[in-house]
Amino acid sequence: MRTRNVPVFIVPLASYKGLNMGLKVKCSDLERELSLEPTCQFVARGENMEELNKSLGKHAKEVHEYTDEQLQSPGIVAAVKAAVQEE
Ligand SMILES: [Zn+2]
């Protein structure tokens, strides 16, 4: 029996994003894309993009009166991805 030597580092680094690190996105960083009030101090946090989107989506709907449809538009999804930071 041969053991296959599969390199573990073959997985692109981006796939690890959010596994061990927290992610955050500042609401104020999205003001241009979302036309939000630049004074909003909210910071959405999550252990992964799913949690982060949940947190941000809830906030955007409650505070900025966004709809699910608006939040799922490609422009906003891209803007959120671009504004995400690891912490
Ligand atoms: Zn906000």
Image: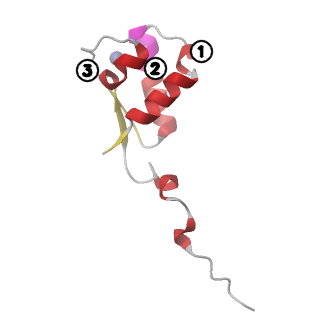
The three-letter amino acid code for the residue at tag 1 is Glu
Quarter containing the N terminus: bottom right
What residue is shown at x 52% (from left), y 28% (from top)?
A: 77
Mark 1 residue element: helix
| N-term mark: 3 or 2 | 3
Residue 41 tag number: 3
Nearer the camera: disc 3 or disc 2:
3
Residue 66 magenta? no
Give the extent of the magenta segment.
Answer: 59-64
Q: Quadrant of ligand 1?
A: top left
Q: Is mark 3 within 8 Å of ligand 1?
A: yes
Q: Residues within 10 Å of mark 3 (few under 14, many from 20)?
A: few
On the image, which quarter does residue 60 sit in? Answer: top left
How far, Cα to Cα, is label 2 from label 1?
13 Å
What residue is shown at x 53% (from left), y 59% (from top)?
A: 12
Q: In this rendering, would 54 be left or right of 23?
A: right
Q: Residues within 10 Å of mark 1 (few under 14, many from 20)?
A: few
Q: Is residue 6 above or below residue 2?
A: above
The three-letter amino acid code for the residue at tag 2 is Lys
Q: Position of residue 86 (x, y in %)?
A: 34, 45
Q: Position of residue 56 (x, y in %)?
A: 43, 25
Residue 69 tag number: 1
The three-letter amino acid code for the residue at tag 3 is Gln
From the image, tell me which residue sits under label 2: 58
On the image, which quarter does residue 63 sit in? Answer: top left
